[in-house]
Image (cartoon, rainbow, N blue to C red):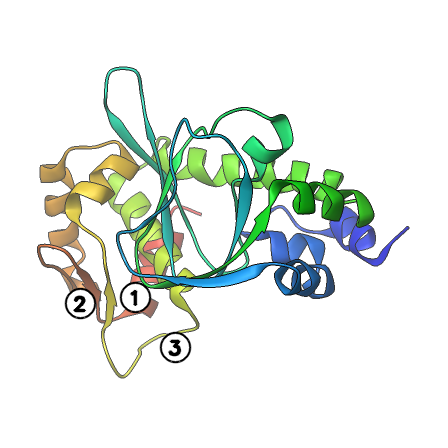
Amino acid sequence: MSEYRERFAGASDAAVQTLRDLAGEDVWDRLVGQSHERWHPPGQTLMRQGEPGDLVVAVLSGVAKVVRTDRGGQRLLLAFRGPGELLGEVAVRDGGGRLVTVETLSRCKVAVMGKAEFTQFVAVHDLTPVLERYALNRLRQSTQARGGGEVRTRLAATLVRIADLTGPHGSLPSQPLELSLTREELAEHLQVSRNTVSRKLSELEFCQVSAGRTRIVIGDLGALRQVAEAAG
């Protein structure tokens, strides 16, 4: 049994696990080393729903959002992805079109690998079981964020998740943490109205959370984390 298979077999379901976590640093570094690195500004589309799956994107820094548009034209913000995540592998592996659109939420550094190279990389490193578990983990995260439960708790958990994706932070950072995020996007993700998000954000003022037109500011991440974990 290979090193990453041992890690894969013993990994905990409780933690949010990226592909880097599941495959291991060595395999992840090889993937990045065989890819082409690029920088993308906020608001740029990395891949578009319906397009052919001809490449995968490994996120090295920054945060991206995953959006799906249904047949009625409604946008569903499914998830947020950060460092250690892989994007686009489903369409590459099954040969179908992209199921989602991925847009940068902040400035992102990514590593891009073509379909043929990725297919060979998966075969050489026997990554199929890891990718299957990775897909299940992402489905679970998305379902938990948009599922039942008190909206304030889910909102707090979403903000904490995005904050954690941006990098390590202390329980009370010296500078407020700014997230390039709108109330509309949070409403899409949580499947509630914008007014509900605004109301619940006001309930988080004791965590020093404030909302501008295009930014959410967190002053006390530690307090916000306690709200997010209250239901657990």
- Report x, y in % for residue 204: 18, 57
Q: Are marks 3 and 2 in contact (CB under 8 Å)?
A: no
Q: Are marks 1 and 2 in contact (CB under 8 Å)?
A: yes
- Report x, y in % for residue 163: 35, 62
Task: Inspect the image, locate mark 2, and give the three-letter code of the amino acid beneath it.
Answer: Gln
Label 2: few (<14), some or many (≥20) within 10 Å? some
Q: Earlier in the sequence, mark 1 or mark 2?
A: 2
Q: Residue at x 51, y 36 (%)?
A: 140
Check disc 2 and report its element: helix, strand or loop: loop
Marks 3 and 1 sit apart, C-alpha to C-alpha, by 11 Å
Marks 3 and 2 sit apart, C-alpha to C-alpha, by 15 Å
Q: Residue at x 55, y 60 (%)?
A: 36
Q: Earlier in the sequence, mark 3 or mark 1?
A: 3
Task: Inspect the image, locate mark 3, and give the three-letter code of the amino acid beneath it.
Answer: Gly
Q: Residue at x 62, y 26 (%)?
A: 94
Which residue position is annotated with label 3? 170
Label 3: few (<14), some or many (≥20) within 10 Å? few
Which residue position is annotated with label 2? 208
- Report x, y in % for residue 208: 17, 67
Q: Given this view, does label 3 or label 1 mark the residue nearer the observer?
A: 3
Check disc 1 and report its element: helix, strand or loop: helix
Task: Inspect the image, locate mark 1, and give the three-letter code of the amino acid beneath it.
Answer: Ala
Q: Is residue 96 left or right of residue 177?
A: right
Dividing the picture into quadrants, the one containing residue 118 is top right
Residue 29 visible in rendering: yes
Q: Given this view, does label 1 or label 2 mark the residue nearer the observer?
A: 2
Residue at the right extreme? Answer: 1
Res 223 label: 1
- Report x, y in % for residue 23: 70, 54
Q: Residue at x 29, y 52 (%)?
A: 156
Residue at the top extreme? Answer: 71
